[in-house]
Amino acid sequence: MKSVLWSGFSSAESARRTSRVAACAAWFVAVATGGLWIYLFERLGKEFISMTSRPSLTPAIMFALIGCALWWRQSRVAAVAGFLYYLDLVIHGASSGDAKFVLGNVIFLLCFLYGMRATFAFHSFVRASNAD
């Protein structure tokens, strides 16, 4: 069962593909967060700003940048940052009593976790091929 849920990577290309799944997850979070923020700001205006504790587009911009770094550079820093930042958003939402979309949060956390593993594996494969 462990090999199915926590399988290894056979090549740099398989690790790259997995890190790109995490990049797509980051872009999805960026578009959903930014789009929802813009929509609510347009509909509610200043009322929306007073209702939210995080009234900014910072999460959307951060996840867009994380997605770019994962897609083109397989950045380990971006992978760890994406996982930790999404985990922070999930914990903040759960602590404020907003425990909706638990399954979606678990799926995205797993995407970021596998992206982290993939970026480290990718750089290990590259380092090994350069040593040969």
Image (cartoon, helix red, strand yellow):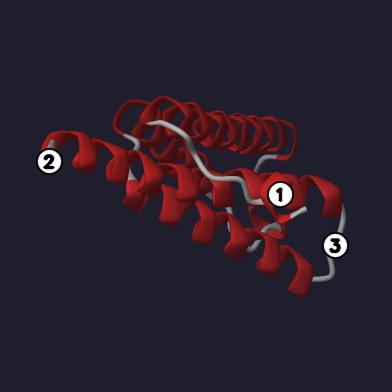
Q: Secondary structure at mark 1?
A: helix
From this viewpoint, which residue is outermost toward the bottom? 95
Give the amino acid at mark 3: Ala
Q: Residue at x 61, y 61 (%)?
A: 87
Q: Quadrant of the C terminus?
A: top left
* Mark toward the viewer: 3 or 1: 1
Query: Visible in this render: residue 57?
Result: no
For marks 3 and 1, give the CA distance.
Answer: 25 Å
Give the amino acid at mark 1: Leu
Query: Visible in this render: residue 4?
Result: yes
Give the amino acid at mark 2: Ala
Q: Which residue is mark 1?
A: 5
| Mark number, residue 28 | none
Rendered image quadrant of residue 2: bottom right
Compared to residue 104, the image places residue 84 above or below, namely below
| Mark number, residue 131 | 2
User: Upstream in the sequence, badge 2 or badge 3?
Assistant: 3
Q: Residue at x 39, y 45 (%)?
A: 121
User: Upstream in the sequence, badge 1 or badge 2?
Assistant: 1
Q: Is residue 84 left or right of residue 127?
A: right
Q: Nearer the viewer, residue 45 or 75?
A: 75
Compared to residue 24, the image places residue 127 above or below, namely below
Residue 110 screen position, x and y as percent: 66, 49
Residue 50 screen position, x and y as percent: 67, 58
Q: Which residue is mark 3?
A: 99
